Image: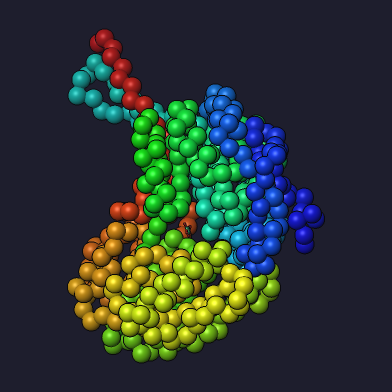
Amino acid sequence: MTFQSISIFRDKCLLNGKWCDSKEKMPVYNPSSQKVIAQVPSMGASETKQAIRDATQAFSTWKQTSPMHRAKLLSEWHRLILDAKSSLAYIMSVEQGKPLAEASAEIDYAASYVLWFAEEAMRVQGEVLSSANPHQRLIVTRSPVGVCAAITPWNFPAAMITRKVAPALASGCTMLVKPAQQTPLTALALGELATQAGFPAGVLQIITGEAKDIGEEMTSNPQVRKLSFTGSTKIGSLLMSQCAHDVKKISLELGGNAPFIVFNNSDVSVAVEELMKAKFRNAGQTCISPNRVYVQSGVKDAFTQSLIKAITELKLGDGLEPETTIGPLIDEAAVQKVIHHIENAKALGASVLCGGNRPLADGNWFEPTLLDNVPPNALCVVEETFGPVVPLVTFDSEQEVIHLANDTPFGLAAYLFSSDIHQVERITNEIDSGMIGINTGVISAANAPFGGVKASGLGREGAHTGIEEYLEMKYQCYGFKA
Ligand code: SIN
């Protein structure tokens, strides 16, 4: 397969129903080869402003459509995404680096949000409230927020778009998306499929270009009523402050620092298997990836031996190679961060049990790595590494591990492995986290609420509550004569 042979491949922006180009271009790289694979338009503030005007115009008619009509178009988009799965997975693997099988699984995951919100569109209801006054009737209806904007990350180039766009369109909002600079091609192909599904011009637009210029226009333009962002806490809090002046609604899915806790009474083989899935998905470049692994002293040796075996079986390589199970990191900065975290842990007394090297002088490759005896102040424990590094920390008591797990400003995901239901209940109650995996490392699903507490964000995506983020309540109080 090549980009030229893929009918849905697009390298222009989708603006008001047209594919638009610009003189200025931005290169897109393959993280395996570091070669330029495409050029996309570098749009700025004026094109963003025009797109917001067009989204406002489109909103005036889109909000009047019936939920059934919106559900029908979303269902068609879902069908088209699944039909184009192999093309989308290829585009994603080439621009993002993840193995083809993982890219294909992400397309299924992305499509599941579209189907979920196609169905949720038809379940948006109002309420009739009881009134203390017999001459009044109190009614609550829900209406779409208005024009929405989304800024999406490179680590899940399809799912983070559908998780935001599908509930927005289902509720009657229009949406302008700025995909990550590293991975615009998956987004543009999804835009082409949305056009084929029949969404009218301006309902979904996709703009590529300078993050700062586009983001500033999205946050300062009063016609935008909601911003949804997935990315770092630093940028999320900046966007939040930019949205404050006209009090836009905002959803933020930000950084994590997930603890993975293994108790003496757990099934060690299950814990290792689930850690491998959760940690090495997308080479560790996942917000809910376990960032620090706490193992109780009684199972430490068995757990460590089994984990070394599993890690050394991983096959690092180009995402398109059939035997690859772990791809490159997204860019040089990501590799440098991993190196810095490993060097810092070693300087503080940690030992490398496997991996630890950059196998080639060039390329964004890094070996899956296991570190032991990592102290609590090491950077790889304190900060999100966002790479294929597992720091092991041994603990003795429940109280100790609860303290360690919560000793972070973040609270996105946590994982715990225990066969004692009472212990599970105790720990689950104590851990400050928006999501907890109990005896499993696979927690994401379209019908579950995804999001964090503390510096990990605001709001939830997915689940039946995900559409609420795109709706406003309108309370109506009717007075009548007896
Ligand atoms: C993320 O890393 O932000 C998303 C991961 C997921 O949805 O499972």
The answer to which of 238 and 466 lies nearer the viewer is 238
Q: Position of residue 116 (x, y in %)?
A: 52, 48
Q: Position of residue 466 (x, y in %)?
A: 43, 45
Q: Residue at x 41, y 77 (%)?
A: 343
Q: Quadrant of the C terminus?
A: top left
Residue 130 shown left or right of residue 126 in the figure: left
The answer to which of 459 and 382 lies nearer the viewer is 382
Q: Is there any visible trace of residue 327 in the rendered image?
A: no
The answer to which of 443 and 48 lies nearer the viewer is 48
The answer to which of 259 and 61 lies nearer the viewer is 259
Q: Farthest residue toward the top?
A: 481
Q: Residue at x 42, y 54 (%)?
A: 232
Q: Is residue 50 above or below residue 161?
A: above
Q: How is the image coloured?
A: rainbow
Q: Quadrant of the N terminus?
A: bottom right
Q: Is there any visible trace of residue 56 in the rendered image?
A: yes
Task: Residue 438: name its quadrant.
Answer: bottom left
Q: Farthest residue toward the right?
A: 5
Q: Position of residue 396 (x, y in %)?
A: 23, 82
Q: Residue at x 54, y 75 (%)?
A: 366
Q: Residue at x 58, y 80 (%)?
A: 359
Q: How many marks on residues?
A: 0
Q: Position of residue 16 (x, y in %)?
A: 64, 32
